[in-house]
Image: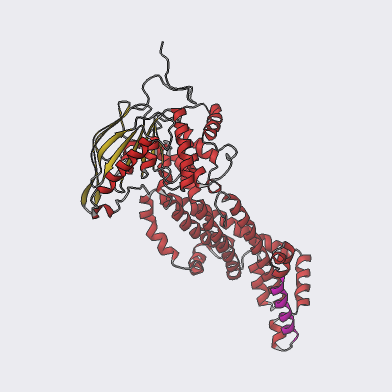
């Protein structure tokens, strides 16, 4: 008899098959800038196991946000291969959720409507949707704010709402594109803890891009360190510490110093200062 | 002091200071005699004209006629303007075909079209309604176009992520995102329709309406009636604009500070 080793998730419909195995093979991506073609991702190879939390750090312009846009399917122009559970990524899908640095909640909808819209084109029965939405709003600790409009929420609350919207479809793979980049330091720590708690409860595969090495180490099972111009993987660091983690763990601090030294040692290439169009997706 | 001034009763009183001063000055001019007395009808004769127009029912008839002409024009021109503006913003071929023509037409003030429209459609109430509708059409068109054309990419991405159909994209993203500008367009359309109603009534004198009465009173040199019609126009315009702004605030209650 098959026994699911993962803790029970909110879902009752989780498949018994492997959920959210991501493979990226020989991925190359270029942007055309004024007639020139500029390589932004150079031979990316990455495998993420189901249920794994992988962080990506790197200097601005190393193509990490571009990589997420490709994986989520908002940009299909690349060479190489991206597969989720063996299936080739060609367009967006409810299997893959994403949270951006800006929450991107619709200002004209309440928090509840914003979360519910993610279920619009799923086969979730209409009768169950309200309950699922309420569960996910509770999961990110926003009970009581269901009828609030986004402008009435603080930055941290809006970002948690965006996380609830991304999770409500129970994506196999959750992509986080600097989700906490716009938050102040205190809120950031709080939402990091929350993110860790939610991930431990849900155990979906997570790929998170961040500027913050400490955040990458605190949350990730592995940290992918990228180098810029063209964006490529410099190294991948395993963090062999169980979750939930203690921020004061000596290993995290040692690795942080190491990675920071590596990132700052890279020669400052003036070409990096050029902002790539479309990189931020707005 | 500031707290006292911001109380509702105080605000209304303060708002009445300027009109009271203006009326006193008016009355003083009217009693100065000579040519002045003709150009400035004394307040009591304006009051008498008001009573007379109320009693024979013509003031109410005129107000209803002008108001319904404006609102009908707003409904026709506003609806067509929004529909075409949205369609042009969504479907670019339409924009390329119609954009230049519409922009050219727009350069001629509406009253400039009146002689031509008069030849085509006569000088009756139908032409009045066409001019009023046209005046509401352009602000509704331009603002709806801008609103839909400039919906932020980041919101459209969300629609892509959750597999929105074209209809969902329109109903849940494009339309609400464009709503602030669509309503700005309708606010302008309302003002233009109101101006066009009075202007065409004065110029064509077809049917009844405040402008028709103004024109008639001018030929009869009844300054008091002209003034009653002007005051009624001001009050009615003020009221519908106020009601529309309340509707707008309600529709845009999701905005940080609804304008």
In reply to whether residue B213 is colored magenta, the answer given is no
- Quadrant assignment for the N terminus of chain A: top left
Its colouring scheme is secondary structure
- A216 sits left or right of A232 in the view: right
Q: Count of labels shown?
A: 0
Query: Over which residues does the magenta segment extend?
Result: B15-31
Q: Which residue is most to the left?
A: A36
Task: Identify which residue, B1 or B28, lies in the foreground.
Answer: B1
Q: Which residue is most to the bottom?
A: B34
Examine the rendered structure and indicate whether residue A230 appears above or below residue A117.
below
> Residue B199: x and y, percent?
58, 68
- B124 sits left or right of A76 in the view: right
Examine the rendered structure and indicate whether residue B198 appears above or below residue B28.
above
Q: Residue B127 lies in what quarter of the image?
A: bottom right
> Residue B229: x and y, percent?
68, 70
Residue placed at 45% from the left, 41% from the top? B169
> Residue A172: x and y, percent?
39, 29
Examine the rendered structure and indicate whether residue A2 appears above or below residue A85.
above
Task: Identify which residue, B121 or B173, lies in the foreground.
Answer: B173
Task: Identify which residue, A77 or B233, lies in the foreground.
Answer: A77
The overriding secondary structure of the stretch rendered in magenta is helix
Residue placed at 41% from the left, 13% from the top? A2
Say if residue A66 shows up in the picture.
Answer: no
> Residue A78: x and y, percent?
25, 39
Residue placed at 73% from the left, 68% from the top? B13
Residue placed at 52% from the left, 62% from the top? B135
- B184 sits left or right of A223 in the view: right
Say if residue A220 shows up in the picture.
Answer: yes
């Amino acid at each position: 008899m098959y026994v699911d080793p993962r803790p029970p998730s909110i879902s009752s419909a989780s498949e018994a098959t492997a959920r959210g195995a991501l493979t990226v093979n020989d991925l190359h991506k270029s942007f055309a800038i004024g007639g020139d073609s500029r390589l932004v991702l150079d031979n990316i190879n990455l495998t993420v196991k189901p249920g794994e939390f992988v962080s990506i750090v790197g200097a601005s312009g190393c193509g990490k946000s571009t990589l997420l846009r490709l994986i989520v399917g908002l940009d299909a122009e690349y060479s190489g291969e991206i597969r989720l559970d063996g299936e080739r990524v060609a367009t967006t899908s409810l299997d893959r959720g994403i949270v951006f640095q800006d929450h991107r909640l619709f200002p004209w909808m309440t928090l509840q409507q914003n979360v519910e819209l993610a279920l619009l084109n799923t086969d979730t029965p209409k009768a169950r949707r309200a309950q699922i939405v309420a569960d996910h709003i509770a999961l990110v600790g926003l009970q009581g704010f269901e009828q609030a409009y986004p402008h009435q929420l603080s930055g941290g609350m809006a970002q948690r709402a965006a996380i609830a919207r991304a999770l409500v479809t129970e994506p196999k793979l959750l992509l986080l594109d600097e989700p906490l980049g716009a938050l102040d330091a205190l809120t950031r720590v709080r939402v990091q803890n929350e993110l860790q708690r939610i991930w431990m409860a849900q155990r979906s595969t997570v790929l998170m891009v961040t500027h913050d090495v400490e955040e990458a180490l605190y949350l990730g099972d592995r940290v992918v360190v990228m180098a810029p111009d063209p964006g490529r993987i410099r190294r991948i660091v395993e963090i062999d510490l169980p979750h939930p983690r203690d921020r004061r763990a000596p290993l995290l601090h040692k690795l942080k110093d190491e990675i920071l030294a590596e990132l700052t040692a890279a020669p400052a290439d003036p070409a990096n200062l050029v902002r790539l169009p479309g990189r931020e997706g707005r | 002091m500031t707290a006292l001034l911001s109380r509702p009763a105080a605000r209304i009183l303060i708002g009445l200071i300027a009109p009271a001063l203006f009326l006193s000055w008016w009355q003083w001019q009217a009693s100065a005699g000579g040519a002045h007395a003709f150009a400035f009808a004394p307040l009591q004769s304006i009051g008498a004209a008001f009573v007379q127009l109320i009693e024979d029912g013509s003031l109410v008839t005129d107000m209803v006629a002008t108001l319904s002409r404006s609102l009908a024009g707003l409904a026709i021109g506003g609806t067509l303007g929004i529909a075409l503006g949205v369609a042009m913003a969504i479907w670019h071929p339409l924009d390329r075909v119609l954009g230049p023509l519409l922009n050219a037409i727009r350069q001629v003030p509406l009253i400039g079209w009146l002689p031509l429209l008069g030849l085509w459609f006569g000088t009756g109430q139908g032409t009045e309604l066409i001019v009023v509708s046209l005046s509401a059409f352009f602000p509704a068109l331009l603002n709806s176009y801008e609103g839909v054309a400039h919906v932020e990419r980041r919101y459209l991405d969300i629609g892509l992520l959750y597999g929105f159909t074209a209809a969902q994209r329109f109903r849940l993203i494009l339309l609400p995102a464009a709503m602030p500008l669509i309503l700005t367009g309708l606010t302008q359309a309302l003002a233009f329709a109101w101006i066009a109603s009075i202007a065409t009534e004065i110029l064509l004198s077809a049917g009844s309406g405040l402008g028709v009465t103004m024109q008639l009173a001018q030929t009869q040199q009844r300054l008091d009636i002209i003034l009653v019609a002007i005051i009624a126009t001001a009050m009615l315009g003020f009221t519908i604009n106020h009601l529309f702004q309340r509707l707008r605030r309600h529709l845009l209650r999701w905005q940080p500070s609804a304008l």
